[in-house]
Amino acid sequence: MSLFQNILIIVILIAGAGFLSLTEIALAGARKVKLKILAESGDERAQKVLDLQENSADFFAASQIGLNAVAILGGILGEGAFRPYFYDMVARFYHGPWTESISFALSFTLVTSLFILFADLMPKRLAMIAPEKIAVSVVNPIQVFIVVCRPLAWFINAIANMLFRLFKVNTTRDDNITFDDISAVMDAGAQAGVLQKQEHHFIENVFELEERNVPSSMTTRENVVYFTLKESESSIRQKLAEYPYSKFLVCSENIDDVIGYVDAKDILVRILNNQSLLQLNENTIRNVLTIPDTLTLSELLDRFRSTKEKFAVVINEYALVVGVITLSDIMITVMGDWVTPIEEDQQIIKRDNNSWLIEGSTPIEDMMHALAIDEMPDTDNYETLAGFMMYKLRKIPRPADAVIYGGYKFEVVDVDHFKIDQLLVTRLLEQSEVPPEEATS
């Protein structure tokens, strides 16, 4: 054959190999979610791609048969077609025993480079740009190719399946979507501008409900306002006026003797009707939902939904009340500043670009969001910033005690009766002075 005929055949082989490479990557990379959307919109080709992904063994066997056959045939034809011309070219500069070997190497390198570039690298990179669109476009011709190669593909698949069973390899594709997968998609959407920063923050918080425990969002024990059975009318009126809460615990004598709760609306109705508040009774006291402090916020939402309640008392393993939590508290955890009252004291105050004043009771997740910290050490051992300090210092912190972690310095500013009230968090600008892991003082 002439050089032109050989080049034409090699071009056809490269085009065929490129088509198979393009199809292989497109079918493997096409996302099921997008394909299902296309299928539901009436595109039958998308459903064919989904079916092909479910039974991909025949396709991959046929694809490898075609790719390897084309590559071998292209090597044989290319080497025979180009070697004489390379031989004549080399002979002009060198005459010796290596002339034949050099011409063979040059011919092999040229053909291999053409196949790598045009039949492998470029088609695969193109397929990764829009795998779903390409997969839908090529699914019909590739099904014809699979039918042609089916006898040999069946034989090859039988051997492969036997070897997989012999070595106990599970060939079932796992299509389960994890939180990490969704988080990666959200990050990509935020970077592309599809999701706004606030929307991205909301979605992350919703998924964190499964990981955050109730104590991270509850009103702590020392901040709970409650009535006792012997509470005076003037005291009840004063608490109603001083604290803008809609629900108040009712206890026998102390906070650990919980009887129920009263709705501020019921008390206000009694006041408007000029009824006495000297004694809280069964007409005003309601049964309160009691939950353990080990529940996650997601589990508490399920509990609220099943009981039709919006208020719960949180107790620990010693049956002591550690706090109260409402449905509104969970919404604040998800929505953040959008539903937090403006007049409410902020737990995190940004002083400048590199320092923050943070309350010790701040949930560790909120602190991580504010400081853009991806990971904190051993988070199973604490839930608040104060807990983190106590865990790292291994003692009851005092003012000026500090912990250095992740490029930040956490310094205790104020302590009230062993409780860490406030910390100063400073970003360390001189990264060279920060130890690779952490430091404590």
Image (spheres, helix red, strand yellow):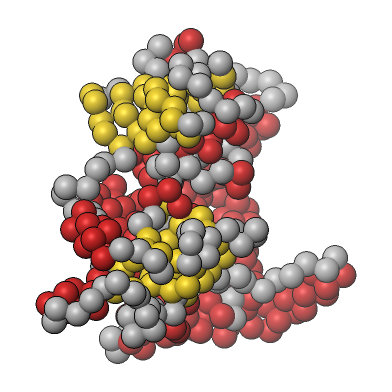
Q: In this view of the protein, can residue 143 be seen by the observer?
A: no
Report the side of 264 relative to 88 (left or right).
Answer: left
Location of residue 308 in the rendering, given as x and y in whole percent from the top left corner: 38, 83
Q: Nearer the viewer, residue 265 or 435?
A: 265
Location of residue 33 in the rendering, given as x and y in whole percent from the top left corner: 40, 74
| Residue sitting farthest toward the right | 166
Residue in the image at 72% along x and 24% along y: 97
Location of residue 139 in the rendering, given as x and y in whole percent from the top left corner: 43, 78
Residue in the image at 49% along x and 58% along y: 254
Q: In this view of the protein, can residue 332 be seen by the observer?
A: yes
Q: Nearer the viewer, residue 80 or 288?
A: 288
Residue in the image at 21% along x and 54% along y: 242
How many numbered discs? 0
Relative to 45, is 246 above or below?
above
Report the side of 415 relative to 344 (left or right).
Answer: right
Residue in the image at 78% along x and 67% along y: 169
Q: Quadrant of residue 163?
A: bottom right
Q: Nearer the viewer, residue 329 or 251?
A: 251
Q: Nearer the viewer, residue 121 or 176?
A: 176
Relative to 304, is 371 above or below?
above
Location of residue 159 in the rendering, given as x and y in whole percent from the top left corner: 80, 74
Q: Quadrant of the C terminus?
A: top right
